[in-house]
Amino acid sequence: MLDGAQVVLDVLNAPSWEDQAVLDFFRATSSQLLAAEANAGVAHHVALSIVGADKLPDGGYLRAKVAQELLIEQGGIPYTIVRSTQFLEFLRGIADSATEGDVVRATSATFQPIAADDVAAFVTDAVLADPVNGIVEIAGPDAAGLDVLLRTVLEADGDPRSVVADPDAPYFGTRVTDTDLVPQGPARLGGIGLAAWLTAHPRS
């Protein structure tokens, strides 16, 4: 199915985020895809992953992405792993998942969310470039506590829920610190900040 392909871009996502199910998904799909690439002589495997995934082993989804990265690194195909920070498009969903009554409880740990359009541009750059056989990190231009980001989004939406900073609030099942989910070294930064994104993507 990959005959003639020079580059494969893997942005597959699991239908279930239950810990074992998501781990099984990324192991199975990555193994099958890498084997097919080897048979077809694919020259470059590009995969989208998550900044800081390797720092949070208690998060089942993040643990699964680390397992995927390991398979890619050991798979024998020249590769580029693009690690991205959280998408701006997911902030509203994060607020919903952290809502108790009329209150959103969110960590104040630093986040640096990136617009999906910027992610697409950076991934395209990776596809067109030579393999780095390593990791490239990407992030948005604005960094702030997750509680601050969610409060900004809700206020822009005219949403009456209040946001409370809670250092013990989990992020998809695990606690995070200021350095866990933001780049700690060189990273490519997108050009779309939260304010511009909100203007372009009002609550429908």
Image (cartoon, rainbow, N blue to C red):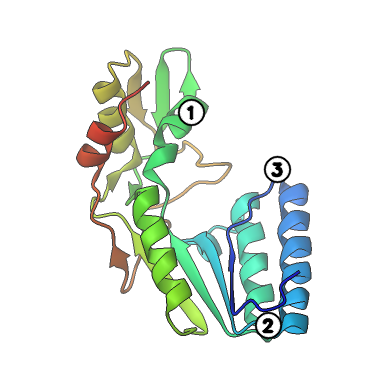
Could one spot residue 100 in this view of the protein? yes
Q: Classify 10 Å Cα crowding around label 2: few (below 14), some (14-19), many (20 and above).
A: few
Mark 1 neighbour class, 10 Å CA radius: few under 14, some 14 to 19, many 20 or more: some
Residue drawn at (30%, 68%) of the image: 188
In the image, is 71 to the left or to the right of 54?
right
Q: Position of residue 155 (x, y in %)?
A: 25, 22
Mark 2 or mark 1: name the one nearer the start of the chain: 2
Front: mark 3 or 2:
3
Query: CB under 8 Å between callouts 3 and 1?
Result: no
Q: Is residue 178 visible?
A: no
Q: Look at label 1 and name its amino acid.
A: Ala
Mark on residue 98? 1
Q: For residue 201, which numbered disc appears in the image?
A: none
Residue located at (78% from left, 68% from top): 32
Q: Which mark is residue 15?
A: 3
Q: Which corner quadrant holds the N terminus?
A: bottom right
Q: Give the x, y percent position of residue 59.
A: 60, 51
Q: Secondary structure at mark 1?
A: loop
Please tell me whether mark 2 sits on a helix, a strand or a loop.
loop
Kind of residue at badge 3: Pro
| Residue at the (47%, 73%) spot, across then down | 127
Front of the two marks 2 and 1: 2
Q: Position of residue 62 (x, y in %)?
A: 59, 56
Residue 74 numbered mark, or none: 2
Q: Nearer the viewer, residue 143 or 16?
A: 16
Note whether 65 is above or below 75 in the view shown: above
- Could you tell me how far apart the alpha carbons at marks 3 and 2 are, in whole angstroms? 25 Å
Mark 3–mark 2 contact, CB under 8 Å? no
Distance (Cα) linking label 2 and label 1: 37 Å
Q: Amino acid at mark 2?
A: Gln
Q: CA distance from mark 3 to mark 1?
A: 21 Å
